[in-house]
Amino acid sequence: MLPYTTVVEAEAALGRSLTVAESLWLNYTAAKSDYVLYCHNIIFLFVIFSIFPFYYLFLEYFFKNTIEPFKIQPKVKISLSDSLSCYKSVMRMFFLVVGPLQLVSYPTIKIIGIRTSLPLPSLWEIAVQLVVYFIVEDYTNYWIHRLLHSKWGYDKIHKVHHEYTAPIGFAAPYAHWAEILILGIPSFLGPAMVPGHIITFWLWIALRQIEAIETHSGYDFPWTPTKYIPFYGGADYHDYHHYVGGQSQSNFASVFTYCDYIYGTDKGYRYQKKVLQQLLEGLGSNSINNGNLQDKSAAQPCKFD
Ligand SMILES: [Zn+2]
Ligand SMILES: [Zn+2]
């Protein structure tokens, strides 16, 4: 909770006038405890898990022909009832695991030193911290994900997330409860290393989940702004990980491509890309006309996987 409740008190404490954003923040948070502010994450996650996958479902039903060329595995059809049953499972897990995890993890952000006070961080500070959070989480997530692909990890935990060999937006948070808990840890590492304002923390949790929904959407839209992020994996990259399935030893990284490149776990993906490219350039003119080459199955997973 802020140590002042009025603009006058806040300006006296800061020794300057408040910006518009700071006045709004003061008005909104003056009477709210830090715990209540932290629990806003539960509402944000609920909204994100609901709205963004439904956006893809909406496009699929009302702009089917427009988005069809960008479907990564066009032969796989997932019915509306299957999509809604996935959403139901995610919501069950949300209320049983994700929400309670947020409620009890509050002491962690107090220990880390996430602040709710004024002054608000600059846009530059927010951007730099978000980049650090994404890089730290991506690296840690890469190794945890690799461990989850050990025989024990896969059979006991990670198999649930891989039930979708052609993922959909709803399936991004679809996982065993233990995986949700384990992969929650890397989310706190970046903020622990570079603690910031709770607004940055909210943004971090929200953007990471939106990114996960996009990479599980099953569509590789050329207009997505994430295409401009260096070393960004994207939907096609993670879709390949699901496509190969249980035996997948490729494309473990959650956000960027550099970990798989450095540790040599993107060979299968790169090989498949090369084969598809060759088919498109040379042999494929007939197949292209038949529309066959849109499908990944035109190039089967190779021995590198
Ligand atoms: Zn996996
Ligand atoms: Zn996945």
Image (cartoon, grey):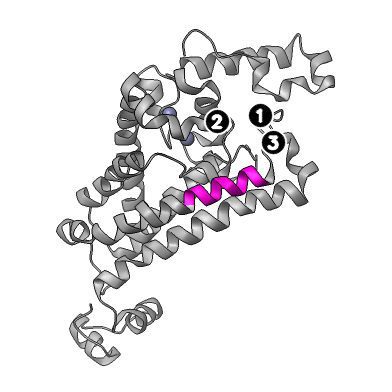
- Looking at the picture, tell me which residue is in the foreground, 53 or 133: 53
- Looking at the picture, tell me which residue is in the foreground, 278 or 30: 30
Q: Secondary structure at mark 1?
A: loop
> How much space separates mark 2 and mark 1, taking CA atoms?
9 Å
Mark 3 close to ligand 2, CB under 8 Å = no
**x, y percent for residue 90:** 48, 49
> Disc 3 vs disc 2: which is toward the camera?
2
Q: Is residue 105 above or below residue 260?
A: below
Name the amino acid type tagged 2: Asp
Q: Is residue 43 above or below residue 83?
A: below
Which residue shows up at 29% across the image and 84% down it?
A: 31
> How much space separates mark 3 and mark 2, taking CA atoms?
13 Å
Q: Look at the numbered discs 1 and 3 and tell me whether their residues touch, using CB distance below 8 Å.
A: no
Which residue shows up at 68% across the image and 16% down it?
A: 298
What are the residue bounds of the magenta stretch? 81-90
Q: Quadrant of residue 78?
A: top right
Q: Which residue is mark 1?
A: 73
Mark 2 close to ligand 2, CB under 8 Å = no
Name the amino acid type tagged 3: Phe
Q: Main secondary structure of the magenta part?
A: helix
